[in-house]
Amino acid sequence: MRRKDDDFAVEIEAHIRLEADRLVERGMKEEEALAAARRAFGNPTRSQERFYDSRHWCWWDALSQDLRIATRLLRKTPGWTAVAALTVALGIGATAAIFSIVNAVLLRPLPFPHPEQLYAVIETMKLGDFAVAPDYLTMRDNRDGGTLPEMAAYDSAGVNFAGADRAERLVAARVTASFFPTLQAQPLRGRIFSPEDDRPGADKVVLLSYGLWQRRFAGDPAIVGRKIRLDRSPALVIGIMPRSFDFPKGSDLWIPLALDEAQQRERKAMLIVEMIARAAPRASVVEVNRHLERLMASVKNEYPRQSGSKGYTKDFVQSLRARVRPLQEELTGDMRPALLLFSGAVGLMLLIVCFTVANLMLARATTRRREIAVRAALGSPRLRIASHLLTESLLVSLLGGALGLVLVITVIAVLNSSKETGLPQVSIDRATAAFAAVVTVLTGLAFGIAPALGSLGFGVREALESESRRASISSALRLSSRSGLRRMRQALVVAQLGLSLTLLIGAGLLAKSFYRLRGTDPGFRPENMLTARLNLTGASYDTVERQRGFIQELLRRISGLPGVEAAGIGELLPIISGNSMNFRIENEPHVPRGQEPRTMVVDASPGYFPALGARLIQGRWLSERETAEAPLAVLVNETFARKFFPGGDVLGRRISTKADEDDPGWAEIVGILGDVRARGLDRDATPTVYVNFLQEKHAAFGSTALLIRTTSDPLGLVLPLEKLVASIDRDEPLFNAKTMEQRLSDSLGSRRFDAALTGSFALIAVFLASIGVYGVMSYLVTLRTSELGIRLALGARRVQVLSMILREGAVLALIGAALGLGGALALSRYLATLLYGVGTRDPATFAVAALALVAAVLAACAIPGRRAANVEPAIALRHD
């Protein structure tokens, strides 16, 4: 296929031939006529260039030429190309990986139709931020369908699934019939709940998650319409939800909430629920919140008419508030601070990458001054030269982006396999790919602008003279003092160092916080302790006596297992759980409803405390001899004693968690335990009361924690323990078996991940900054070779030359450290919510980070410094 410019050249030649033939007819010789015709036509090349411009092909020709030249030059310097591309790959790979996480958690819309209309409804009261079923019912019945067309309530609970091969504990979401219509979610098979399903006493029905359907039923579509056993009762499977439906997160199945509306409206055994709502298409957050204010007025009016709400003070009722928050923000609220931290950290690192590669490009451009000067002397426009350098930087960036894609895939695979991050499954989708492509191009432009602009300032005469072997020493010294590019490179290095120190200080604060937290005393001995959970539900365990019988038999058999030192049960496991309730103290003044003191209450067996390794501060332990007929005895922790009995008179005092005046159920405090951090190592101990489960008369336990202290590896007991539980009741699953050390480690997983990831970014940033310092100092040594030779020839000692180079590097380090300290002081306040036991301006962390950066800079300066000190004067004077 012929090109258009070839056709144009043929046409020009045809015109010239025609003119030559006309001249020949007039009597001129053929050669003379051809020459005259060419002179008359003019410059064919100029005409062809005008043809290019008119056809807009010139830019493409220039770009393709730049790409060919850049590719050839990069191939000639594979070492430099590899360093630059790998540096870019680090920045782009880390940036794209963090974006993929942010996109999956914060940016990607929820997998429901019109997710922007979905809101979480949050009720606020003096007791905390939670909603109760009576308030949901009132708001549901009084809502304006034009503003809130749909509203639903739900909560999560565990259920025992009795499979054909083994029993299993599953996570069940209990939802109202309006739950799926609110989300506008449809099942993959079958149907969703109807209002008739969501009534007390209705036949039990269930919707299965896609994962459970595949895992336990092998994806058998015939399971719809069959019955399965949940909590020892049959439940009809009416549908299967799609793979993408995972709300509430981690649910294995969905069952109707089946609220007893009459009982809930009387506020008897109120159920705590979560609420969601779908707003009208054009309703704003402000409008929805105003509507909620009107709904809360209805809620407050209901309190005086509800018998169960008597005793709540007027101030308490008036304090009730409600607001909405976009559902996506509510679901990702805990992750948002960490993700914003990572985004900022990776942004700083990407800037450092740009500065590092810009320095490399400047050094490369400096070594090519003669080439650039020759091109300029031959008439190449300055902008054309700058365009060539910019094309080269874009090519390096594209190569780094391709390598960064491999890094992104690796990082995402590691994140998806880790259980500590708490992140959803992350993947490289079109948004991530587009983001990576844009960042690659912008990064190439960012670090290519400096050398491109620097090329515009090259003096042709100076550049050619500096390369001449005949240049004088004075000329070389004059050129070495030329400081335009030098100042630019030094400024880039100082910026690198400042950003690196800011990142290093942030990572240091997070690391110190993590180690402080890991060293916190939990209040018990976690080593050699196995923990697991049981859930005694169904007709077989509908009374305390039946539950107590199972537990006592289980503990008796566990005590006979080899290697068991102590075993006990408790309602709660330390570190990961805890609920509080109202209580009162005997002979203390009456406190209005809603203002009672609150404490965490833990039902436990006497063996719970030696298995836990708790400390008895004062008094005695609970006893096996304290039965339901004996006077009630309880233990309290130090925080409880200190807060509610500041005078120290604790033992022998009586408390009650019952509101019944006729039968208060006073329990005597017989001992004080050391504080156990029940809600996490990062949260102070809360007031806690420990009740002997042998004395329980009315309340059923349901979920039960099992603690076993062993003399050897606790995990070796898991299989024998599962068999032991099955031998007592084959339908009762033992689940969530872990060592207490594993639970402690898991509780620190997100903080460990935050510190490790930020620390990795900081170390990479310091490494890149050191490369930048090394490049600048190495360039300066090369540029000043003649000067250094003169100094040595005039009697300077080699150690003086080395100290001079180190001193210049130290000046850069100190300036960068000053900028970094200022940046860290400005940004550290954003870390406050992520720190524990460490101030946002911790002097030790700031000092250590600054010293580490200065040490890294001096180490980077040492190599060119030694090379400068070992220059031979005679060789140096012949350098130029």
Image (cartoon, grey):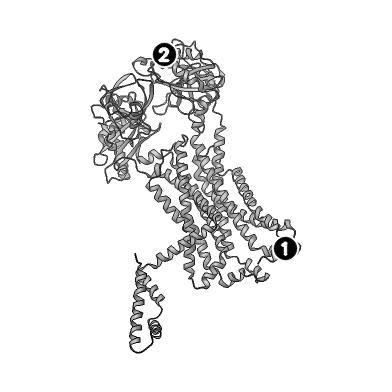
Farthest residue in the right direction? 795
Q: Mark 2 falls on what kind of element? A: helix
Q: Is residue 534 above or below residue 521?
A: above
Q: Is residue 650 above or below residue 328?
A: above
- From the viewer's perspective, is 523 left or right of 285? right
Foreground disc of the pair 2, 1: 1
Position of the C terminus, as image quadrant, is: bottom right
Answer whether residue 647 is visible to the viewer in this image. Answer: no
User: For the residue carrying disc 1, how many other residues have a C-alpha within 10 Å: few (<14), some (14-19), or many (20+)?
Assistant: some
Residue placed under numbered mark 1 in the picture: 873
Specify the amino acid type for callout 2.
Ile
- From the viewer's perspective, is 70 left or right of 242? right
Q: Say which of 431 and 672 sits in front.
A: 431
Seen at 40% across and 66% down, the residue is 59
- Using the numbered discs, state the Cα–Cα distance from disc 2 to disc 1 in whole angstroms: 92 Å
Answer whether residue 13 is visible to the viewer in this image. Answer: yes
Q: Position of residue 768 (x, y in %)?
A: 56, 51
Residue placed under numbered mark 2 in the picture: 728
Q: Position of residue 100 (x, y in %)?
A: 42, 45
